[in-house]
Image (cartoon, grey):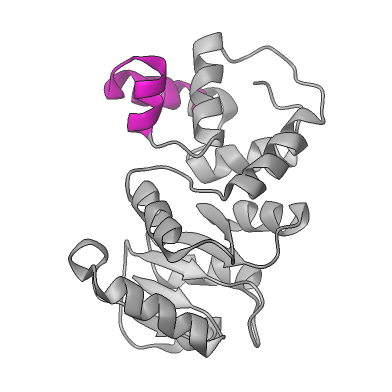
């Protein structure tokens, strides 16, 4: 697990908290800038990253693309005081898998990481409200996706894991995966990040 946070007190607090659960999250490494992470010699892949936006040098938003290249398969959750729509949109479009405000308690950050491991896209409730309002501001075109496919997409936009979507809709996990493959083909995308970015960028996307 990686942490990029320039505030020493916050960084150390995160490290100490997650050191208690290395069996679940793996070794904990912390950096005070994106550059420090990119310059570190160790090769990593398929890890979790808590990333701040306001950083010295390269911002977290700028760093997402570089980090994903340097750390293949890295799942990124933004943890920031910035909760404006533009920052959220830019982070999701760049490849972030979740977005939390910096006042989120450590326990909730841990829950967000577990949600991410299960395939969800964790978002702080206040941020989810902004995203929801943004989606509702445009005129939807109710075509292309079937009602069940729309239900699946809504589950993803709500930050649910595939298992929780299956529970919500009372269907099997394999059924959820089947519908998601159909949605990806119809929308010509390949990942949840692209799906979320598409709906955030274009409120007219059918839902």
Residue at screen point 32% across, 61% down: 46
Quarter containing the C terminus: top right
- 71 relative to 123 in the view: left or right: left
Residue 180 horizontal/vertical position (percent): 43, 26
The range drawn in magenta is: 162-183
Residue 11 horizontal/vertical position (percent): 47, 82
Residue at screen point 63% across, 72% down: 53
Answer above or below: position of 84 versus 51.
above
Residue 190 horizontal/vertical position (percent): 48, 39
Residue 32 horizontal/vertical position (percent): 51, 87
- 166 relative to 182 in the view: left or right: left
Residue 16: say if magenta: no
Residue at screen point 48% across, 63% down: 105
**Dividing the picture into quarters, in which one does residue 134 lie?**
top right
Answer above or below: position of 101 versus 31.
above
Q: Nearer the viewer, residue 3 or 58?
A: 3
The majority secondary structure of the magenta stretch comes to: helix
């Amino acid at each position: 697990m990686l942490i990029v946070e320039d505030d020493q007190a916050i960084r150390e607090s995160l490290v100490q908290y997650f050191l208690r659960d290395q069996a679940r999250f793996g070794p904990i490494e912390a950096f005070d800038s994106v550059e420090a992470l990119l310059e570190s010699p160790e090769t990593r892949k398929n890890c979790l990253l808590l990333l701040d936006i306001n950083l010295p040098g390269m911002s977290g938003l700028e760093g997402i693309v570089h980090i994903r290249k340097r750390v293949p398969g890295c799942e990124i959750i933004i943890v920031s005081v910035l909760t404006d729509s533009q920052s959220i949109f830019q982070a999701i479009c760049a490849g972030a898998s979740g977005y939390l405000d910096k006042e989120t308690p450590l326990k909730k950050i841990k829950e967000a990481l577990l949600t991410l491991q299960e395939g969800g896209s964790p978002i702080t409730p206040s941020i989810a409200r902004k995203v929801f309002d943004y989606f509702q501001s445009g005129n939807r075109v109710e075509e292309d996706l079937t009602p069940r496919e729309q239900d699946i997409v809504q589950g993803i936009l709500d930050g649910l894991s595939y298992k929780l979507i299956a529970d919500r809709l009372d269907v099997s996990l394999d059924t959820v995966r089947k519908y998601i493959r159909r949605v990806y083909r119809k929308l010509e995308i390949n990942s949840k990040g692209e799906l979320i970015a598409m709906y955030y960028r274009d409120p007219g996307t059918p839902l």
